Image (cartoon, rainbow, N blue to C red):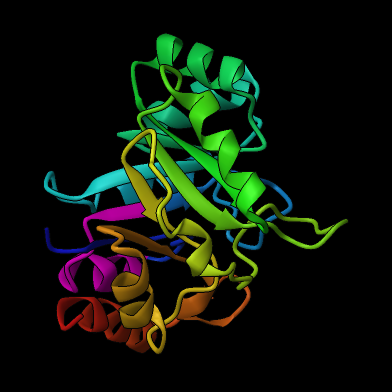
Amino acid sequence: MPTTAKICGLSTPTTLDAAISGGASHVGFVFFAPSPRNLSRDLAAQLAARVPAHVRRVGVLVDPDDALIESVVDAGQLDALQLHNTSPARAAAIRAKTGREIWAAVAIRTRMDLAAAASFMGAADRILYDAKTPPGAALPGGMGVRFDWSLLDGFRHPLPWALSGGLDPANVRDAITRTGATLVDVSSGVESAPGIKDVAKIRAFLEAIRTA
């Protein structure tokens, strides 16, 4: 299967359009106040209106309460919710309440961390393997941290999955070859500064995937 990509943390029409025209299968909108990529409800609605039907909109949330979910799901016209720091039980409840596809982020530093993926069977539709951020970090992801891809060697994935964590235009081909990922997710790796997406880097990342 060809590999597709989610460009995450988009916040301007120009960078959103670059992701779409470059062939991204998913675009990510962040709803987490501490993040430099955080979107207001109104901006999310404006951006969502630019996304064509063949591209899926993913809302990125960190252990969200019901009020936040209700506020952003319709505004962002979200097809899927990517949940960080969220228990399987809570993920299942959100899935039942919203009817949206659920991506459960599993933070990886050691092989033992992969065991958490199985706990989301029946609660999520996809696992997002991301790097575990340093202790005390303000964000659960989007910090350019990469985990050892060899940890996935021989692992029996309990659900469809995507690869995230420290990907960029220079290493994404190697990541795909090493892991067999059919969906990759990038945020800081296509930025010129935290929260500032770079059109040239977005295009380079998507071109690297096409030629992987």
**Can residue 23 be spotted in the picture?**
yes
- The answer to which of 5 and 12 lies nearer the viewer is 5
**Can residue 45 be spotted in the picture?**
no
**Count of labels shown?**
0
* Left or right of residue 32: residue 209: left
Image: 89 above or below 1:
above
Quadrant housing residue 208: bottom left
Q: Position of residue 159 (x, y in %)?
A: 35, 34
Q: Residue at x 12, y 48 (%)?
A: 54
Quadrant of the image containing the C terminus: bottom left
Q: Position of residue 184 (x, y in %)?
A: 35, 62
* Left or right of residue 129: residue 2: left
Quadrant housing residue 27: bottom left
Image: 124 above or below 152:
above
Q: Where is residue 87 in the image (x, y as percent from the top left)?
A: 64, 25
Q: Position of residue 38 (x, y in %)?
A: 60, 53
Quadrant housing residue 195: bottom right
Q: Residue at x 25, y 45 (%)?
A: 56
What's the magenta bit mostly, secondary-structure-wise? helix
* Left or right of residue 178: residue 192: right
Q: Please identify the residue farthest to the front as the structure is shown.
A: 154
- The answer to which of 81 and 178 lies nearer the viewer is 178
Q: Which residue is drawn at 51% across and 36% down?
A: 117
Quadrant of the image containing the N terminus: bottom left
In the rendered structure, does residue 17 fall within the stretch colored magenta? yes
In the rendered structure, does residue 141 fall within the stretch colored magenta? no
* Left or right of residue 40: residue 110: right
Q: Residue at x 49, y 15 (%)?
A: 92
Residues in magenta, as a range: 13-27
Image: 15 above or below 81:
below
